[in-house]
Image (spheres, rainbow, N blue to C red):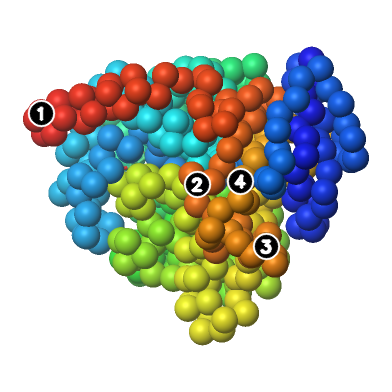
Amino acid sequence: MELAVTGGRVLLPDLTVERADVLVDADEGVVRAVGQDLAGDEELDASGGLVMPGLVNAHTHVAMTLLRGYADDKPLDAWLQEDIWPAEGELTPEDVRVGAELGMLEMIKSGTTAFADMYFHVPEIVDAVADAGLRARLGHGVVTIAKEAETAHDDAEESIAVAREFDGAADGRVSTAFMPHSLTTVGSDFLDEYVPQAREAGVPVHIHANETADEVDPIVEEHGMRPLEYAREHGLLEPEDFVAHGVHTTPEEHELLAETGAGVVHCPASNMKLASGMAPVQVMHDAGVSVGLGTDGAASNNDLSLFDEMRDAAMLGKLAADDASAVPAEAAVEMATQGGAEVTGLPGGRIEPGAAADLVVVDLDAPHLTPGHDLVSHLAYAVTGSDVRHTLCDGAVLMRDREVLTMDEDAVLERAERAAADLVQRV
Ligand SMILES: N[C@@H](CCSC[C@H]1O[C@@H](n2cnc3c(=O)[nH]cnc32)[C@H](O)[C@@H]1O)C(=O)O
Ligand SMILES: [Zn+2]
């Protein structure tokens, strides 16, 4: 079946905008053509809209939607230890399923078609991705500090097992990674033991790194090197690997990232909310580092909209560089599309023949998007998630005219409300 997305304008990979139709091969899940007057077996109306690549949320913990607004206004360490980890200790597989569905509903409704996720009870998340129709790189987050050796090993084994088992699931829309939680919550002996297993399984490694000053200093003190140098020493930073945050990073670390090809996921909202710091995004770009954008979990954001994240990235990037020309709109849009696809190794991020048919249509016919001098500027600074009219992933229509077709929206909200209330009772 061929689907023609007609009557709109299209954001091309070079970030120019052209009046064109997009022909999608729904069976193969690829874009066949971009051009004038294309016809398919079915049509999707994009008139008055901009057809753009589906957004890539390159770092999140999707089931944390259940903890949205549960614990705010604290720094990372206290937030995790006092509130989040105790609550997460009570999450059942069913809770994770419900939270993941809520997050995916939110993503589909705000134009995200692919995401990278670190969490636990991953089989539930795989099933939710399969049903929702999205694309994802999933992994089990490992923590080894303050655990008995056996429990810590079990956690790491589970991460490797999950990565092996589910790579290629959901008709190839799910891929996986080995996901040690962070350079300070996983011991180096565990990295040394399990990273080679990830290589053997052919999956990348995704980890939190250099998020706060508090997690940089102990590594420098104990090992006499910067965290990313330490990461490299322990087998990380292969080209397919990607680290979340990279807030407190030095020029030497940027050089290391650029040389190795490992990517960074910038999470500006989470970094602002937890007061973690300002990532030197413009400096990283100038150094040739691949950068994607992530929301991080909904408990530190508090939403999963990449449109908000683009705006935050552009705004914070200017403040960090003390330069209004830093992280321009184009850079924000690039990070949320091609950049995220590159960093996570997921298809998508570009609309061109042969590319994955992961795309969204944004309604431009609105007061806050008038006049239309520069649509890339609008995407970075003025569009919000609720402006998304249609969402397609892998050639399938997931949302048409704001109606999500792959999920029962009311049922998802009701289940989430109930699961969250029960959870808070138990904690
Ligand atoms: N298996 C681990 C869980 C790791 S999943 C990934 C974890 O990252 C946590 N997380 C969420 N946001 C952040 C962040 O900004 N920095 C570090 N960790 C985070 C999240 O709450 C979740 O516990 C365990 O048993 O504790
Ligand atoms: Zn995170």
How far, Cα to Cα, is label 2 from label 4? 10 Å
Residue at left 64%, top 30%?
392
Please report whichever mark, 3 or 4, sits nearer to the chain's N-terminal start.
4
How far, Cα to Cα, is label 2 from label 3? 18 Å
Q: Which residue is mark 2?
A: 385
Question: What is the three-letter code of the residue carrying label 4?
Answer: Asp
Q: Which residue is mark 1?
A: 426
Please report whichever mark, 1 or 4, sits nearer to the chain's N-terminal start.
4
Q: Nearer the viewer, mark 2 or mark 3?
A: 3
In this rendered view, identify the residue nearer to me: 247 or 113.
Answer: 113
Q: Which residue is mark 4?
A: 363
Question: What is the three-letter code of the residue carrying label 1?
Answer: Arg
Image coordinates for residue 220, horizontal then vertical, percent:
40, 68
Quarter of the image for the C terminus: give it. top left
Q: Nearer the viewer, mark 1 or mark 4?
A: 4
Question: Is residue 413 shown left or right of residue 182?
Answer: left
Q: Which residue is mark 3?
A: 372
Image coordinates for residue 54, horizontal then vertical, percent:
63, 41
Please report whichever mark, 2 or 3, sits nearer to the chain's N-terminal start.
3
Q: Nearer the viewer, mark 2 or mark 1?
A: 2
How far, Cα to Cα, is label 3 from label 4? 12 Å
Question: What is the three-letter code of the residue carrying label 2?
Answer: Gly
Question: Does the numbered disc 3 mark a residue whose Cβ is under 8 Å from ligand 2?
Answer: no
